[in-house]
Amino acid sequence: MEPRPPQPPFTEATARQKIQMAEDSWNSKDPERVAKAYTVDSEWRNRSEFITGREEIVAFLKRKWAKELDYTLKKEYWAHGDNRIAVRFEYEWHDADGNWFRSYGNENWEFDELGYMRKRYASINDVPIAEHERHL
């Protein structure tokens, strides 16, 4: 696999760059594009779901974005280490019935030496909101 800059060890600036790249990718709502940022055997915990590998990532994201319509995400830097980054995030979406939600959470990421994410652990809470309360 080709290197995926920026690569570890991270500085605050390169961690922030990696976070922005992830935000842009997820906001594309393109499961194939998103999955390319992860190792082929990447491990995820997303809420109560455990996901392993790019194929499962793509399947998960297709299900997610079929349910979470008009998804818009914002990620923010929290902390970093040599090959780890912690972020807080929020995103807004609505269901097929037009009910709006804001989802809040934290993610812990671990990267391989080439800059691919090999572990992603996400804790997420959903809050119902009125459409006029949206800010993303």
Image: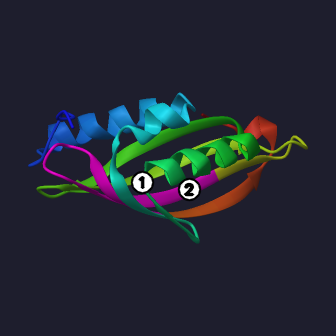
Q: How many marks?
A: 2
Query: Which residue, given by chain and number where applicable, does mark 1 sit on?
Result: 88
Q: In the figure, 42 relative to 15: above or below?
A: below
Residue 30 image offset from top left, x and y in percent? 55, 31
Is-magenta flag for residue 68?
A: no
- Do labels 1 and 2 touch, CB within 8 Å? yes
Query: Which residue, given by chain and number where applicable, does mark 2 sit on?
Result: 104
Q: In the figure, 19 relative to 89: above or below?
A: above
Say what amino acid the circle numbered 2 marks. Answer: Tyr
Residue 12 image offset from top left, x and y in percent? 16, 44
Q: Name the residue: 60% across, 48% down.
A: 59
Q: Give the image quarter of residue 37.
A: top left
Residue at disc 1, secondary structure: strand
Residue 21 image offset from top left, x and y in percent? 34, 32
Residue at disc 2, secondary structure: strand
Say what amino acid the circle numbered 1 marks. Answer: Arg
Q: Disc 1 or 2, which lies upstream in sequence?
A: 1
Q: Name the residue: 25% across, 34% down.
A: 17
Count neighbours of disc 2 (C-alpha within 10 A) and say few if under 14, some if 14 to 19, many if 20 or more.
some
Count neighbours of disc 1 (C-alpha within 10 A) and say few if under 14, some if 14 to 19, many if 20 or more.
some
Quadrant location of the N terminus?
top left
Query: Is any part of residue 69 visible from this angle?
Result: yes
Q: Which residues are magenta?
A: 103-122
Q: Image check: 84 left or right of 119?
A: left
Quadrant location of the C terminus?
top right
